[in-house]
Image: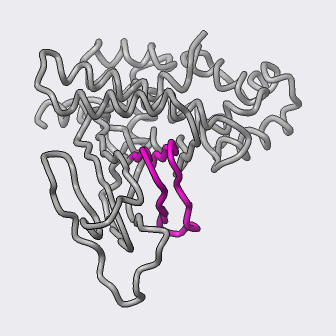
């Protein structure tokens, strides 16, 4: 049986950027504006506050894990408020990979392990759009262990370090994402997998992306009427079943083109198109360039 979540994370190709230990005492605040990089944080001791742009503040406590698959604007701060006109706190480096925020002469109020990773996929934006905007998990010891392994491995230069980090990050992302699977949260793949009827249709699409699926066929797989299935899928996943099928086929096609696995005719068949011309038209409409031009652009890059 295909696992949609594992397939999406695998196509994202996560790799480590950096991680660091941050301890803080007294009032402090740091704000970040990022270019959509994945950000994660594990609270090792104490508590602090996280505010993601456009959202309400979240209090983070010991053993809390937070993942923002595409971070743009967010801030972290002490529970003790800063003065209204105070500037952001400047981190002080204590040692390689260790930083201090606030008062060094006071007992730390919080210790966090924070880090960024990157997605190697050329289609990361589409795949990330299937994930929640924010994942917050409490007291999951497996995540704590995985984050610490990522931190330890990132600080070494042992053989196959990059391969190990890539695998650890894949496991970390899958563990975090499946720990948050449920009916709540923003529409996307995880929320769809949390709905037992919609999850059946998602798995069928991932098992047989080449099949000429229709809404009626997928509704039958999910044991729902066509209209009930269509509304339920769109409400939980955030797009129509046919749009999801198209997006997934195009993500697979881009990956095959990136890895140079076959010519256009072969790739067309492997993602569910009866001819190279039909595939090329669909690809160009979806991506903006032909498959050949897309592959040429990857080669030149």
Residue occupying image coordinates x 29% and y 24%:
257
Q: Quadrant of residue 242?
A: top right
Residue occupying image coordinates x 51% and y 19%:
272
User: Nearest the camera: 1 or 17?
Assistant: 17
Queried whether the magenta region covers residue 235, the answer comes back as no
Asked if residue 70 is positioned above or below residue 300 in the image, the reply reads: below
Q: Quadrant of residue 104?
A: bottom left
User: Nearest the camera: 256 or 80?
Assistant: 80
What residue span does the magenta drawing correspond to? 40-68
Asked if residue 299 is positioned above or below residue 227 in the image, the reply reads: above
Asked if residue 207 is positioned above or below residue 184 in the image, the reply reads: above
Q: How many marks?
A: 0
Q: Is residue 52 left or right of residue 232?
A: left
Image coloring type: one colour
Residue occupying image coordinates x 28% and y 70%:
103
Place of residue 182 in the rendered image (x, y in percent of width and height, measured from the top left): 70, 37
Q: Quadrant of residue 179?
A: top right
Residue occupying image coordinates x 53% and y 41%:
130
Q: Is residue 127 left or right of residue 240?
A: left
Place of residue 273 in the rendered image (x, y in percent of width and height, measured from the top left): 49, 20
User: Can residue 24 be seen at all in this image of the molecule?
Assistant: yes
Asked if residue 100 is positioned above or below residue 85 in the image, the reply reads: above
Majority secondary structure of magenta residues: strand
User: Can residue 252 be seen at all in this image of the molecule?
Assistant: no
Q: Kindly give the residue lying farthest to the right in the view shown.
A: 225
Place of residue 65 in the rendered image (x, y in percent of width and height, measured from the top left): 49, 43
Place of residue 44 in the rendered image (x, y in percent of width and height, measured from the top left): 42, 44
């Amino acid at each position: 049986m295909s696992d949609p979540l594992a397939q999406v994370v695998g196509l994202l190709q996560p790799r480590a950027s950096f991680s660091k230990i941050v301890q803080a005492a007294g009032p402090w605040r740091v704000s970040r504006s990022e270019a959509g990089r994945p950000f994660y944080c594990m609270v090792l001791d104490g508590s602090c506050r996280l505010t993601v742009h456009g959202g309400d503040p979240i209090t983070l406590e010991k053993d809390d894990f937070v993942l923002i698959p595409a971070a743009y604007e967010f801030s972290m701060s002490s529970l003790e408020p800063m003065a209204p006109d105070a500037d952001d706190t400047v981190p002080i480096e204590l040692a390689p990979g260790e930083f201090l925020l606030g008062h060094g002469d006071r007992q730390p109020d919080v210790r966090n392990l924070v880090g960024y990773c990157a997605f190697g996929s050329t289609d990361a934006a589409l795949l990330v759009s299937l994930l929640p905007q924010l994942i917050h998990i409490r007291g999951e010891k497996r995540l704590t262990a995985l984050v610490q392994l990522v931190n330890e491995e990132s600080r070494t230069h042992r053989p196959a370090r990059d391969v190990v980090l890539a695998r650890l990050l894949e496991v970390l992302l899958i563990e975090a994402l499946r720990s948050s699977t449920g009916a709540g949260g923003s529409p996307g793949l995880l929320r769809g997998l949390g709905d037992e009827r919609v999850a059946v249709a998602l798995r069928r699409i991932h098992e047989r992306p080449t099949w000429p699926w229709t809404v009626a066929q997928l509704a039958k797989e999910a044991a729902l009427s066509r209209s009930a299935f269509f509304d339920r899928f769109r409400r939980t996943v955030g797009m129509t079943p046919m749009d999801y099928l198209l997006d997934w086929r195009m993500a697979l096609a881009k990956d095959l083109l990136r890895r140079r696995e076959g010519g256009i005719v072969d790739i067309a068949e492997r993602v569910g198109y009866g001819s190279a011309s039909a595939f090329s038209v669909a690809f160009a409409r979806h991506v903006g360039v032909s498959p050949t031009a897309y592959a040429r652009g990857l080669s030149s890059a």
